[in-house]
Image (spheres, helix red, strand yellow):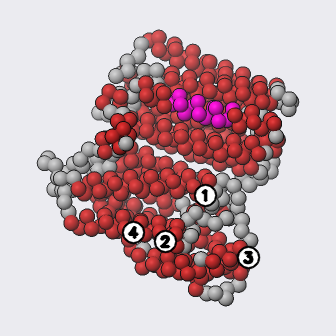
Amino acid sequence: MITNRRSDTGRLTSVWLALCGLTVVSAVAAAAFDDGRHNVTVGLVVLLIGACKARLVLQEFMELRHAPRWLGRLTDAWLLGVVAFVAVMHAYQRHR
Amino acid sequence: MRRRLLAMVPSGEDLDVPGSINMWLFVVGELFIFAFYFFVFMMYRTHATADFVGSQRHLNLAVGAGNTVILLTSSYLVALAVQAAREGSHDRARRLVRWTVALGVVFMTIKLGEWAYEVRHGYTFPSDDFFMFYFALTGVHLFHVLMGLGILGLVLHELRTPALQRQFVVEAAGTYWHMVDVVWIVLFALLYVLR
Amino acid sequence: MTATVRPAPVIGGVAPGDRLDLRICWWITVGFYGLFGVIFVLLARVMPPPGADLSTEQIVAFYADHRTTIKIGFGILMVAIGGAAIASGIVAYEMTRMSVGKVFVYTYIVSLSVGALPGCLLAAICCLTATFRADLDPQVTELLFDITFLSFVGSLGCFVANYSILALAILLDENEVFPKWMAYVTIWQIVTELLAAPVFIFRTGPFSWNGVISFWEGTALFGIYMMLLIRLVRRNITTPAAVS
């Protein structure tokens, strides 16, 4: 059984703030560098940011940190697969 | 072969997951189902990237980011609610879940508003490939948000009834809602910020 | 799956143990779905569907090429469609053993009864009309072709209701007639059913009636669902009655 401590609330709040901050950063990056020349790099950066956000939600909000490791590894594998595929497809389009 | 497959099925202590193992099965299944949609989207995007990015510019990035923050906040609140319920503060948990529902409704309203805006400006479901995916993917996601609101409504009922107040129900609902959030994080990246 | 399956409990004096009538119905169900697969895939050739962007000539050619097997396949379906009633009935019977009210059972039965028409009969009748009436105007043939696939792939309302009611019943059922995870597998069907709706709009791409999302993914998930459902019913029928 998972029991929480007072400090867990603080941790959740930090995670939430980080998530919001990362969202803003990725939106600003996308808007600022939308000039056709940096698309691949910026795309990979925002993908990485998205991956970090997703992993934070999975590990912290969904408490996979405390869950049996097979479940954490399964979701990590999912995230890795999605991000890797998207990153490769995104980078690949540059050369067409 | 069969024995090896069966050995992979988690049992006993391995099932001591947050909430409900059945809900986790559902959630992981949904993640893989959505992953398939993401793959198909990227396949089509790779063949017509310039067109996709061109259409993408008609989306309002600020609104998309704002909506993402709203959904993230709702996730934060339901995570707090799970903690509150665990401590036995069911009233506080109920309040937090109500706020989660409220933010969920706000998210849906903004999404529908976005859709209305796009349709009014001539970007509809059959306009082009990007918008085909945009409406389909955000539509499926919205359906999941709707289901989530139903599940959270059930949680409110649980928390209100002293005879119930089962912890695993609150946690399972949280697990589902966070999944909706994770899917949106990826959708936001694919549809709004990936250029 | 067997590792996590538990025996079904006894309720209200109705034992799930060896019942000859249930066994017969189960075998008819399995036979029907097997036959369904043979008909739709091998004979009528509507699974996987031909393209949604074919020209009128290509559509006429489709019916000409497969005239004989369509007649045989869908002709058999006209007679064998009763198997669908039994397939629905046996699941409905399991639902009567649940602790939830009978309204779930009635909704399940009605939604599948309605669903039989857009789900397969409309396709069968249109294809039989197209093949048994050789001198049809090509435009009419094209219309029959469109109705076949729009109804077969695109039909949804009744099935959404069906899946919703089954999922809800399983989740609320205190007798654990079906394991809770089956409710979630059923909910996946709702999602795929919704994503079949765009076939009315798109003639190419992933959301056309032979599209990778609207058809292929939906069908794959449906196959898994159906196999699990049939397996779970069998488990309930063959498990010796528990003493309560």
Residue contact at pointers 4 and 3, CB within 8 angstroms: no
Q: Residue, x 29% and y 50% (percent of image)?
A: C177
Q: Tell me the tag on residue C32.
A: 4
- Does residue B100 appear in the picture of this structure? no
**Alpha-carbon span between mark 4 and mark 3:** 34 Å
To which chain does the residue with label 2 belong? C
- Residue to which mark 1 is pinned: C197
Image quarter where the N terminus of chain B lies is top left
User: Are marks 1 and 4 in one subunit?
Assistant: yes
Count neighbours of disc 2 (C-alpha within 10 A) and say few if under 14, some if 14 to 19, many if 20 or more: many
Sequence-wise first label, 3 or 2: 2
* Magenta-drawn segment: A75-87
Q: Is residue C224 magenta?
A: no
Taking C174 as reference, is A22 left or right? right
Looking at numbered disc 1 in the image, what kind of residue is underneath it?
A: Ala
Q: Is residue A85 magenta?
A: yes
Q: CA distance from mark 1 to mark 4?
A: 27 Å
Dot 4 or dot 3: first in sequence order is 4
User: Spatial distance from mark 1 to mark 2, Cα to Cα?
Assistant: 24 Å
